[in-house]
Image (tube, rainbow, N blue to C red):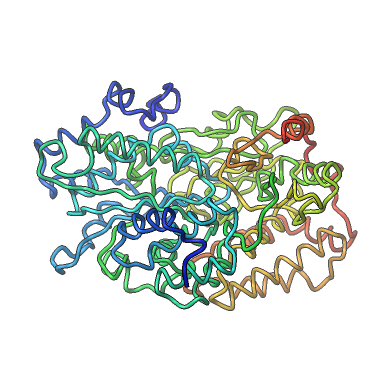
């Protein structure tokens, strides 16, 4: 089993520069400065079929080609370390155990696009990770992997870590920019896209932590090699965050395209004595899958084809002790809480749906509730400035479609049909 | 008016932060973190001083403070329990953890104990689902919570 990023999770003190160097750290960057022009790097990344691993799955090489290089304005890179999609914890692992890998990836991207200033936007709750990053940056500057004239290449790069303050919506790229600029995280209308008009009105590339962290491997071994590790157009490996009712929750670095069934087995399978009921395959915003849909390949295109999404690869397993009405309530409560409030369908929709589901969970469901939920859900897609509402709509509609009988039971019988409504505290 | 909150030493730190950004306003979140780390919360006086320091209307500061969950306008408890309530933690029994804590601390979610020692909050996903049910306590992530683990933490909390 090939371990690229995840090899660093098992190496003690991998976050320290000397240890990182011992394991091939900054070799890719050295090679790049000595042998490659920026266009060469971009070409290699295009060949790799590396796609945005924060959730959107947008082609990384393609993103770079959208950045205008001669506006006279500086180009910025903002690193999205605002990991907030429920079920996802991979970036936390990367920053904790391999901050230098991220910095090397940042260096490669910056060189390719012509960027000299980078902001890492990290969620406020990641206190230890914030320290680790600053520590790593200091180490890198001291040894000339960052700062001025890096490795005698003539290339300068400054990296600043910027802490968020508790808002899921700031993981949305334009809300991230707003927050970086010192405002509320209200997403912007697109177009214009950040590549053209981003931070401080300048062309800006925005990448997820994990996406950048694969760049050193791509340069070391080639884009073609990376692409082949995954499936067509869905290149490489990715870090699957597996949690919920599995025996061994944790990070599993696997090829894009691994069957979900295999991934669940790799994570130890469903808890002993229980039966699989449902899977959230790509973070909380993804449409839920039933136990009969686990043959699906875990890549962006295959998941999209069955009406769900690869997203952030936050995989939440639910067994037969999970109440789907409760699970949907918890989901919609999350979106309701995190809605920034700008757009009526999202602000009102998520709140309203949460209140209806709470009534249902408490045994006060009404016969008109399901139709009401579907109706509210119908205006939460494609009608808002950002995709949070779409991310709330997909679970809402998929739970109602695939587990409708449970909702009907709750309304009719005013209780849950499961003997155990929640797992027991260990 | 002379600065009480942004006293010279703190102001010097704030100036260094401002130098990191093209636009002065971009320093707002880090400066607010600086103040909160030093004073424990962001008072009305702090809001006014920061507004003047950054050069924006006070209402803009208020907007930011009320938008983000990590900024507090009032002092927090000495020990805050921030228990995650999103899906993986819910599946792992976070409600029972909350029930246990409410009984132990004698307060409900969102409240602070009368002596100001303990606070209990429910928060959304902290990005640590592999250790569900979990909470953030004093900057650390504490996971695989059991009643015993919580008792241990409480006994150490002076």
Q: In this orientation, does residue A332 appear?
A: yes
| Apparent side of residue A219 relative to residue B74 in the rendered image (left or right) | left
Depth check, front residue: A66 or B43:
B43
- How many numbered marks appear? 0
The correct choice, above or below, for B95 with respect to A264 in the image is below
| Apparent side of residue B43 relative to residue A188 in the rendered image (left or right) | right
**Whole-percent x and y of residue B2?**
47, 68
Using the rendered view, name the quadrant where residue A102 is placed. top left
The correct choice, above or below, for A152 with respect to A343 in the image is above
| Apparent side of residue A332 relative to residue A266 in the rendered image (left or right) | right
**Whole-percent x and y of residue B88?**
65, 44
Using the rendered view, name the quadrant where residue A94 is placed. top left
Using the rendered view, name the quadrant where residue A77 is placed. bottom left
| Apparent side of residue B24 relative to residue A157 in the rendered image (left or right) | right
In what quadrant of the picture does the N terminus of chain A appear?
top left
**Whole-percent x and y of residue A263?**
53, 34
Residue visible at 24% across and 56% down in the picture:
A64
């Amino acid at each position: 089993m090939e371990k690229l990023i995840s090899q660093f999770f098992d190496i003690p003190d991998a976050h320290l520069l000397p240890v990182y160097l011992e394991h091939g750290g900054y070799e890719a960057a050295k090679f790049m400065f000595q042998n490659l022009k920026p266009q060469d790097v971009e070409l290699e990344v295009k060949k790799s079929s590396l796609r945005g691993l924060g959730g959107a799955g947008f082609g990384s090489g393609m993103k770079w080609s959208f950045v205008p290089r001669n506006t006279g304005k500086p180009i910025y890179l903002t690193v999205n370390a605002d990991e907030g999609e429920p079920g996802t914890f991979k970036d936390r692992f990367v920053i904790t155990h391999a901050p230098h890998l991220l910095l090397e990836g940042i260096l490669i991207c910056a060189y390719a696009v012509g960027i000299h200033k980078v902001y890492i936007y990290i969620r406020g709750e990641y206190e230890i990770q914030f320290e680790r990053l600053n520590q790593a940056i200091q180490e890198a500057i001291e040894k000339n992997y960052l700062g001025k004239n890096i490795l005698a290449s003539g290339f300068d790069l400054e990296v600043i870590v910027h802490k968020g303050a508790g808002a899921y919506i700031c993981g949305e790229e334009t809300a991230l920019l707003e927050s970086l600029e010192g405002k509320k995280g209200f997403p912007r209308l697109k177009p214009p896209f950040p590549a053209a008009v981003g931070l401080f009105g300048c062309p800006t590339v925005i990448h997820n932590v994990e996406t950048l962290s694969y760049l050193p491997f791509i340069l070391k071994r080639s884009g073609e090699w990376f692409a082949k590790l995954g499936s067509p157009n869905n290149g490489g490996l990715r870090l699957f965050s597996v949690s919920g009712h599995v025996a061994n929750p944790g990070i599993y670095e696997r090829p894009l395209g691994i069957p979900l069934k295999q991934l669940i087995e790799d994570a130890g399978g469903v808890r002993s004595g229980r039966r699989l009921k449902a899977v959230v395959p790509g973070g909380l915003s993804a449409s839920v899958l039933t136990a009969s849909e686990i043959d699906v390949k875990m890549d962006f295109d295959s998941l999209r084809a069955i009406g769900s999404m690869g997203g952030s690869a936050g995989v939440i397993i639910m067994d037969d002790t999970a109440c789907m009405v409760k699970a949907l309530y918890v989901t919609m409560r999350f979106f309701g809480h995190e809605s920034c409030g700008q757009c009526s369908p999202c602000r009102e929709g998520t709140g309203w749906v949460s209140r209806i589901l709470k009534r249902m969970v408490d045994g006060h469901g009404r016969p008109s509730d399901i139709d009401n939920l579907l109706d509210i859900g119908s205006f939460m897609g494609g009608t808002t400035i950002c995709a949070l509402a779409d991310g709330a709509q997909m679970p809402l509609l998929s739970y109602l479609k695939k587990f409708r009988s449970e909702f009907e039971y709750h309304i009719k019988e005013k209780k849950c049909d499961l003997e155990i409504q929640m797992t027991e505290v260990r | 008016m002379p600065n009480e909150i942004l006293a010279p030493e703190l102001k010097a730190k704030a100036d260094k932060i401002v130098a990191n950004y093209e636009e002065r306003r971009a320093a707002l979140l880090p400066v607010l973190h600086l103040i909160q780390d030093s004073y424990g919360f962001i008072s009305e006086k702090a809001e006014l001083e920061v507004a003047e320091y950054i050069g924006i209307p006070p209402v803009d500061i208020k907007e930011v403070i009320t938008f983000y969950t990590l900024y507090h306008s009032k002092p927090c408890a000495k020990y805050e329990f921030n228990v995650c309530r999103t899906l993986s933690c819910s599946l792992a029994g976070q409600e029972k953890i909350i029930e246990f804590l409410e009984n132990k601390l004698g307060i409900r979610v969102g409240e602070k104990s009368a002596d100001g020692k303990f606070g209990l909050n429910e928060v959304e996903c902290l990005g640590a689902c592999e250790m569900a049910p979990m909470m953030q306590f004093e900057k650390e992530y504490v996971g695989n919570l059991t009643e015993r683990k919580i008792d241990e933490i409480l006994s150490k909390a002076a």
